[in-house]
Amino acid sequence: MKNNRKSRAPSTTERSALLVERRNLKMARSAQAYVRGNTMKFYEWLEDGEHGLPQGPPVWICGDCHVGNLGPVANTKGHIEIQIRDLDQSVIGNPAHDLIRLALSLATAARGSDLPGVSTAKMMESLIEGYVESLVGFDEIEATDTPEPMQRLMKDALKRQWKHLARERIDNPKPTIPFGKRFWKLSREEDRAIRKLFATESVHQLLTAVRHRDDDSPVELLDAAYWVKGCSSLGRLRYAVLARVGKDDVPENYCLIDIKEAIAAAAPRYPRVRMPRGNAERVVAGARQLAPHLGERMLATQLLGRSVFLRELFPQDLKLELDRVDHADAQQVARFLASVVGRAHARQLSADDRQAWQRELMGRRSRKLDAPSWLWSSVVELVASHEAGYLEHCRRYALSDAAAEKCD
């Protein structure tokens, strides 16, 4: 990777143009990438009219609950669990929205894996079963209930160390961030602001909260860069910061911190509910309810006059990639992931509210399908609209040979 440390920092206009192109090409790679990257199309569908959805209890929801936003997450004590791992759109809203977004993501994965339509129907049945069961027995899931793809992912997470994170994220186990395609040089104003932020007590407490670090360990900022993150960074502040916690120059003392601007959520929230007014505070509050392992590692603050949140990236944090799924695993995966989301919702409800929500979900069943009719009809509509949108997106942004090469 080219690493021109003396190159000038791209302007805001240059950044935006490059990120727009990257997002559009990334979304053209597959229908599943399009579903992940085009959250707004899902919200437009929700606002388009009455879909006969159940009105669930007001709880914190992910707001963008697709497959890629779930995966292994470690807490500060080193415990690992599969949880929701992206809470940018989290609001207090209708939990049915998370279910439908997850169902759409799974249905798109099935289509991309050339599975027959009956597999998708069975996945929807398994999804609602896993979610409903988790509303009652939400405390734990036995290891035997974890499907093989999830077990492999957890085994991979348990083996990972700093060198794996460094090579994957910054392509460099040494204590520098290489400028190039993924990282751009900071402006002087950005560099000063980040250094000032990392001199604060709140950041010191965040980074020393990890089990193997002493509370009085010094924190030294080693390097920082603007992080080029395709879809999610478009129009936002996004930075990668490399720091060392402690005096010893050893791998376990290095840490990589993600700084991300929080903007207003597009996910629909329930009216007259109380949420933090600041966007970063809202994201952190949602994370602490939905993904405790991640929420305890996050900090809401201000940078350059904007609302941002920080989180240290752990080697054990992995994104679930479900580009290919076979018929044997499809139902188990759907059931398991729905149970993860169900437990995240159930933790916020009383026993009576969980039972009432369970009864509501199982109403209006089709005679030929165990999944509720509102879930099945929603998925059918969304798959159709997203596939059409994906083809049009490819025609507009990835038709040229040069664009196609960049997609590969």
Image: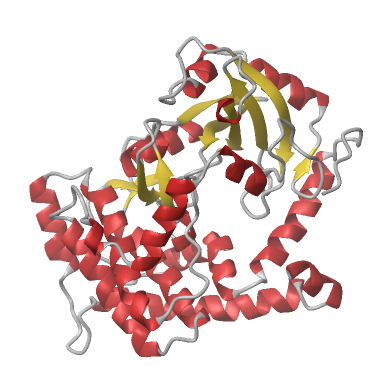
Vertical relation: 26 (above or below) 210: below
- Asked if 202 appears above or below 139 in the picture, the reply is above
Q: Residue furthest top?
A: 216
Q: Where is residue 371 in the image (x, y as percent from the top left)?
A: 24, 77
Q: Which residue is located at x 18 percent, y 76 percent? A: 364
Left or right, 298 with respect to 138, comes to: right
Question: What residue sits 53% from the left and 60% below the top?
Answer: 39
The colour scheme is secondary structure
Q: Is 7 drawn above or below residue 205 in the view shown?
A: below
Locate residue 387 relative to residue 350 in the image: left or right: right
Residue 201 in the image: above or below residue 286? above
Q: Nearer the viewer, residue 231 or 54?
A: 231
- Where residue 83 appears, as percent x and y from the top left, is 37, 49
- Left or right of 157? Residue 29 is right
Q: Is residue 350 visible?
A: yes
The structure residue drawn at horizontal position 60% and vertical position 76%, both measured from the top left corner, is 389
User: What percent of the width, then of the height, locates residue 33?
Assistant: 58, 67
Q: Is residue 63 visible to the viewer in this orientation of the structure? A: no
Give residue 117's position: percent from left, percent from top.
Answer: 39, 89
Question: Where the C terminus falls, by quadrant?
Answer: bottom right
Residue 116 picture quarter? bottom left
On the image, which quarter does residue 195 sit in?
Answer: top right
Q: Residue at x 38, y 82 (%)?
A: 327
